[in-house]
Amino acid sequence: MIDATHDPQLRSWVESANAEGTDFPVQNLPYARFRRASGKAWRIGVAIGDRVLDLGQARDAVAWPGEVAALIGPLASGDLNTLMGQPIAARRALRAALSSALARGSDLQSALQRCLLPQAAVEYSLACHIGDYSDFYTGIHHARAVGKLFRPDNPLLPNYRWVPIAYHGRTSSIGVSGQRIRRPNGQTKGEGPTPDFGPCRRLDYELELGLLIGPGNALSEPIPIAEAEQHLFGVTLLNDWSARDIQAWEYQPLGPFLAKSFATTLSPWVVTMEALAPFRRPFARPAQDPAPMPYLDSDSNRASGMLDISLETSLVTDAMRRAGAAPVRLAASNSAEAAYWTPAQLVAHHTVNGCNLRPGDLLGSGTMSGPEAHQAGSLLELTDGGKRPIALPGGEQRTFLEDGDTVIMRGWCERAGFVRIGLGEVAGTVVPALRS
Ligand code: CA
């Protein structure tokens, strides 16, 4: 699915989109939902360099061809879900139109120039309405490291290599980058027979990708894996905030509940599957591992099922912020090395029992920890369960997150012969618990 929109020679008349290292060259064109100021109308925008193209204005500024105009209509009023429900051909037609409109030499430059705003000057919401959220556990290195903390002799449970493990998440507490995370109160295991109650003392993050669903499926009609990619719309960065002490006490036998449902943060920009087309890798398994069952296996999944996205997590503490210190990088990894299952396998598995997905539904990837200990996507792993503190610039230490800490996650894709694209960032700051 590589086409003219991926041409590495393509440049934009928006000069910041041609800068080395930008997340948003003309080859990317991700969507976000934004408004100019509090009280103004929400609309969908497209990132180009350090600007956002306001599709509310752009709809009226240009005589778009009929098919494209019909697709931009809902976007102009802030609705991304309608586009998400469209077939891939429609999405590709819109991408092609936006690409040529923003490319150097476009006749539309003078009309669209007035529809650009600085990204730094607008306010974002979640890009779409998320009806349902399921959080998978595809990070095998994460699963093994966390399993080892709880079950040293048996870190990976026997189902792990057969079933893409997941639980149903909570949508109401999903927020956009910049979210303030109120430290949760809850029950934790006590020293004696009675549990404690109070603020979480082991607050953590999890570095994940968020997969957003495009066209859905009817109830009781599974999506075959060969068609699964057509049901994926795009990817965001996802921070699955986790209260480890609450989780340890509550998680058996039904899995995490209040340890996860207090907050999940997404990046504002949705990078489309079309933009990610050049950044794929084969799905491969170690020879000793079982082959996936037929409903989780296809030629295209084997050839290019994996997303190849570089990821990193950084931290700024309150003291660092006051001292003007730059964020410190905690770890870096890559989604193709971290994940045991592909996005297509998650879609096929989620629907194999007949469960229906809808446009805008969110699938979390699970924590994207790399194979090495220093590539971990959570503090639980980086500090060996809180036993080995991390030293920070300025003399501070961390085992788990303190009030005032800001966690920043970034993602980007690079491949020879293509222009680098980025996912932007997701940031969130911990604020003190309510008095319990
Ligand atoms: Ca998770």
Image (cartoon, rainbow, N blue to C red):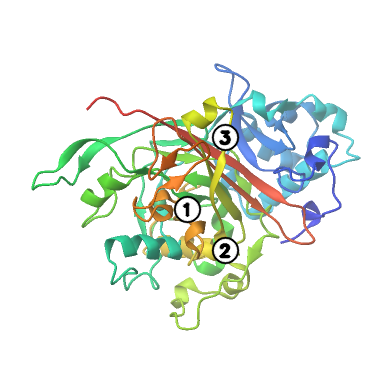
Q: Is residue 236 above or below residue 219?
A: above
In the picture of the structure, the residue carrying the numbered disc 3 is 79
In the picture of the structure, the residue carrying the numbered disc 1 is 377
Instruction: State which tag comes first along the sequence, 1 or 2.
Output: 2
Pointer 3: residues within 10 angstroms few (<14), some, or many (20+)?
Answer: some
Please state the horizontal and vertical placement of residue 230, each as a whole percent of the image: 58, 59
Q: Amino acid at mark 1?
A: Gly
In the picture of the structure, the residue carrying the numbered disc 2 is 336
Tell me the CA gap for discs 1 and 2.
Answer: 14 Å
Q: Quadrant of the C terminus?
A: top left
Question: In what element is the residue under mark 1?
Answer: loop
Q: Is residue 258 above or below residue 303?
A: above
Pointer 1: residues within 10 angstroms few (<14), some, or many (20+)?
Answer: many
Instruction: State which tag comes first along the sequence, 1 or 3.
Output: 3
Looking at the image, can residue 29 be seen? Answer: yes
| Disc 1 to disc 3: CB gap under 8 Å | no
Q: Amino acid at mark 3?
A: Asp
Residue 374 appears left or right of 160: right
Name the foreground residue: 92 vs 321: 321
Displayed quadrant of residue 185: top left
Please state the horizontal and vertical placement of residue 52, each as a whole percent of the image: 70, 32
Please state the horizontal and vertical placement of residue 212, each as a whole percent of the image: 52, 49
